[in-house]
Amino acid sequence: MLIRLSLILTLTACIMMTGCNVDGRSVTINKYTFQFVTGAHEDYVIRGGEFSLTAGQMRLLLSGVRDGYEAALTSNIWDMQLDDVSFGEYVDDTVLDMSVRLMIVNMLAADKRIELGTAELSDSMESADAFYDEHEPELTYVSRDEVETLFEMMRLSDKVYNELGKNVDTEISMDEARVIRIQYIYSKDSMQKLYDAAAEYEEGAAFSSLAAKYSDSAEYTAEIGRGEMDKNFENTAFNLDEGQISSVISCNNGFYLIYCVNDNVEDKIDSQKERIVQNRQKEQFENFFNEFSKNVVLSFDKNAWDRITAQLKQGEQ
């Protein structure tokens, strides 16, 4: 579960089971350690080391994400349920998690002595000022200085990602970068359907027609690279030659019959190599981030965050 709901559950359990005062209590949630604070903290909602995010900055982040979703999916999305939470609660959780990561990455920058150069700082400030000037009538809750600081933190976060993600191994074999085009028939719970389809294929039926007839999925054609699918699916598909059909296989979500249309889509090799390098960079950065975050303690004013989410929820009504 995402951070905010975990915080609520932890706080509720603490109060109900022990009657303790959570102010100053350290709790580790989703690998982050929070020092809970209560009362008014006008200078921050989250603080870690020399960095902090104010109520205005947090509201700006949340408003931006909410506005983006609403523009794409209309205002009817907020009460839609996702498992045990509403879509609005899911977005709140996501933004809080994003904010925590932003804080920790900036703390990591200080630890690694990664800083923005003069030109980068100037560009960040220009972007922040342009944004503030464009939206000033709406930004009654956040100052220009807060917007400039937030933009600087985000720019530094990007630089940290690039700096810590570089110097990965860029040597990629042709087989690693190979992309194949396949057709498949999927059944959630019936192997027999796939055996019937395989028998009809052997009698001369076109695989695409069989997929349309038998598959539980409307999609039956895909181009895939390594590391994108269930391991058994991947191994089976990549061991097929062009024009070859697999046996019926079992995967985590059901059963498959696979047909190889093209065992090496050559015009996709370069983009696949780029994707592999990007994944290696991301993995290397995450290793730095996860190791550093083990020792991070953040102060979190939950009451202030709840006020922000309540204000925006009231605006939806």
Image (cartoon, rainbow, N blue to C red):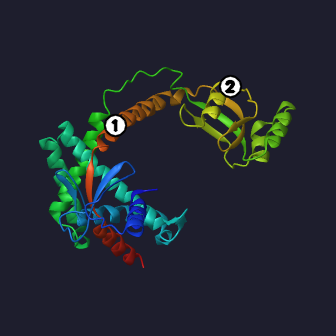
Q: Is residue 101 above or below residue 21?
A: above
Q: Label 1 belongs to which residue?
A: 285
Whether residue 68 is visible here, answered yes or no, is: no
- Left/right placement of residue 115 relative to residue 249 reads left
Q: Position of residue 187 (x, y in %)?
A: 74, 45
Quadrant containing the C terminus in the rendered view: bottom left
Q: Are marks 1 and 2 in contact (CB under 8 Å)?
A: no
Question: Seen from this angle, which residue lies furthest left?
Answer: 118
Give the mark nearest the N terminus, 1 or 2.
Answer: 2
- Left/right placement of residue 68 relative to residue 77 reads left
User: Crowding at label 1, few (<14), some or many (≥20) Cα neighbours within 10 Å?
Assistant: some
Q: Where is residue 298, by image quadrant?
A: bottom left
Q: Label 2 belongs to which residue?
A: 240
Residue visible at 74% across and 40% down? 208
Give SS at disc 2.
Answer: loop
Q: Position of residue 134 (x, y in %)?
A: 23, 65
Q: Is residue 290 above or below residue 173?
A: below
Residue visible at 17% across and 44% down? 120
Q: Position of residue 122 (x, y in %)?
A: 14, 48
- Left/right placement of residue 243 relative to residue 200 reads left
Three-letter residue code for mark 2: Leu
Which label number is shown at residue 105? none
